[in-house]
Amino acid sequence: MQLAELVELVVDHTDGYECFPFNKPTRHEKIIWHVVKHQSNDKIIAMVFEKDDELLIDLKLTIEHGQQMRLIRGVEPGFHMNKEHWNTVYVNATDLTVNELINMIKESAELTI
């Protein structure tokens, strides 16, 4: 999956919109954060980014569900996020199915509304 496809997947399954709140135009950023926020409250649903040629997404899950999902290859505690609630998925290096990823996206949207 490509970055634009992943952002589109998140937007299509939530009420979110893409923005770039962490990227300063006056600085050269190593990571470009594609943040999807709720239209209703501007809370973050997901953060999509590339690091070391890997496509990643940060999603909020219940603590219990996050612990279960971390048993799957390619799912780790959240990168630069609260590691208890947020999880990072290595999108192209995980054993998750697309449907499982979509369900995680929907859960993140529900938990951040």
Image (spheres, rainbow, N blue to C red):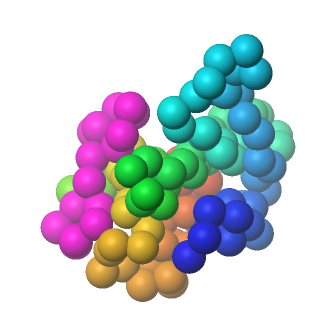
Residue drawn at (34%, 43%) of the image: 78
The image shows residue 81, relative to residue 97, as above or below, that is above
Residue drawn at (42%, 84%) of the image: 97
| Left/right of residue 97 with respect to residue 70 in the rendered view | right
Q: Is residue 85 visible?
A: no
Q: Is residue 4 visible?
A: yes
Please provide percent x and percent y for residue 17.
80, 49
Extreme residue in the front direction: 28
Which quadrant: the C terminus?
A: top right
In depth, the one of 14 and 33 nearer the eye is 33
Residue drawn at (42%, 59%) of the image: 54
Please provide percent x and percent y for residue 37.
71, 42
Which quadrant: the N terminus?
A: bottom right
The image shows residue 49, relative to residue 92, as above or below, that is above
Please provide percent x and percent y for residue 87.
36, 50
Quarter of the figure with residue 67: bottom left
Extreme residue in the left direction: 71
Q: Is residue 71 magenta?
A: yes
The image shows residue 56, relative to residue 8, as above or below, that is above
| Left/right of residue 74 with respect to residue 13 in the rendered view | left
- Does the magenta stretch mainly form a helix, a strand or a loop? loop
| Left/right of residue 36 with respect to residue 75 in the rendered view | right
Please provide percent x and percent y for residue 103.
51, 72
Q: Magenta stretch?
A: 68-85
